[in-house]
Amino acid sequence: MKPFPPYRIQVVKEIPITTRQQREEALARAAYNPFNLPASMVTIDLLTDSGTGAVSAAQEAAAAQADRSYAGSDSYYRFREAVDDLTSYPYSFPVHQGRAAERVLFSSVLKPGQISLSNTHFDTTRANVELLGAEARDLPCAEFGDLDSREPFKGDIDLDALERTLRGPDGERVGQVLVTITNNGGGGQPVSMANLRAVRSLCDRYGVPFFLDAARFAENSWLVVQREPGYGHLTPREVARQAFALADGCVASLKKDGIAPMGALIGVRDPELAKRCEVNLIATEGFRTYGGMAAHDLERVAQGLDEVLDPNYLRSREADAAHFAELVTQAGVDIVQPAGMHALYLNAGRLLPHIPPHGFPGHALASELYLAGGVRAAELGSLYLGEFDSDHNLLTPAPFELVRLAIPRRTYTQAHLEYVADVLADIAKDPSRVASYRIVDAPPLLRHFNLKLKQIPAGS
Ligand SMILES: *Cc1c(COP(=O)(O)O)cnc(C)c1O
């Protein structure tokens, strides 16, 4: 039996239908940066799965009962109950979103000159490490380097590299190990429980704190149940509990697997660290029982954390991503294998060999998806990860030129995803028509959000 979503749609939102002419004008006005497009000009928005999931009737019912007391609100206790059921961290705090959790936790852990080691730091995560004067160093496993390999846990951290670093001359400077589940910056690939256990024992041996960046903890748990020997008989909730239990704490954006419009979580075990986080939280986010979240979002999160672990929901979400992946690969567009759950990562470098890295193949494909079909996607290639000189010349390209098609939770039907696959199939029929791009303006930090570009038509 094919999996199907364990819900029906009760409230819908109309989506904009536009002409190619209108989209060409809109993208030019946006300086060829999809982040500058008004949503009213986007038909299918796959820019992110963050805060874009559909909320349930139960979440809205809980939100309607929210208690907005400044201190000790009922909504806070419901939030704590949902979080404690999963994490067992004695101290946990709500924060308004994941990057605030990063800032509050990391500034309580890391000192300037220290190193944060990760399978892959997400972009805001890296920025929050670097803003503290610390170094963010990624140690993805070797299998991740082969985009076509179907190894089941390509999100794992490279344990040999981790141990070498901890034992070597830089070992003294390592302030934390942070494992991102699933590895969003690394193709959305899951991390195995075996890998988390090995990280735990290395961190014990070298006396370094181990945290999870757990934005997609439920999807990681589901993929562990499906793929890792010895876990098939467990529920995703049981696996999630084991994963949280292995770490000393976590940051988690709840805009992903909290299925909430806004919210995040910091969890820690160490009472001294909790005190430092709390002072920072109160000074910059809010009192410890709301931490920058509105009471109705505390309620949506508490309910969302329960709904997201429903095996029927996770099975259906995995099947949606797998179906989408199959259509896209059949259309002749390679993706980072194997398909995960929250996004497909298209191999734009391979599809558009006529565009060199300094013409930004990932950005070119993302832009063409918009021009051809009103589909918005995010580049994850040299535009985002390359190194540039002050005149915006590309010095070092990214290792891969990818486009991320994020799949918002419960938001689009299979028919929408099939439409996106059709748009891609049209592009893949004659990729040589796709235009390349040149940077005209770029800020030094978090470049991709504020870039301005110029289009260079194919063949010119
Ligand atoms: C989204 C995300 C963040 C940041 O969370 P926000 O809620 O967007 O601030 C951090 N880490 C990972 C892995 C993410 O996916």
Image: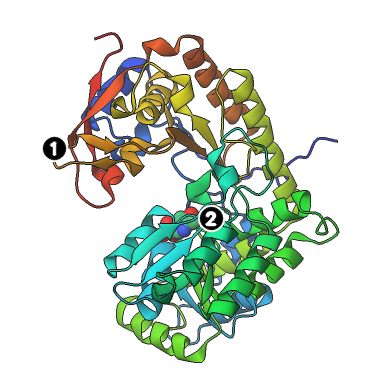
The Cα–Cα distance between marks 2 and 1, rounded to whole angstroms, is 36 Å
Q: Position of residue 136 (x, y in %)?
A: 38, 61
Mark 1 near ligand 1 (CB under 8 Å)?
Answer: no
Mark linked to residue 318: none
Quarter for ligand 1?
A: bottom left
Q: Position of residue 15 (x, y in %)?
A: 47, 33
| Image: 207 above or below 158 | below
- Amino acid type, mark 1: Asp
Q: Which residue is mark 1?
A: 391
Mark 2 burial class by Cα count in 10 Å: few <14, some 14-19, many 20+: many
Mark 2 near ligand 1 (CB under 8 Å)?
Answer: yes
Q: Quadrant of residue 62?
A: bottom right
In the image, 34 versus 260, the foreground residue is: 34
Q: Which residue is mark 2?
A: 256
Q: Quadrant of residue 375?
A: top left
Whether residue 86 is visible, yes or no, is: yes
Left/right placement of residue 233 relative to residue 236 reads right
Q: Position of residue 284 (x, y in %)?
A: 31, 77
Look at the image and tell me in which quarter the C terminus lies. Answer: top left
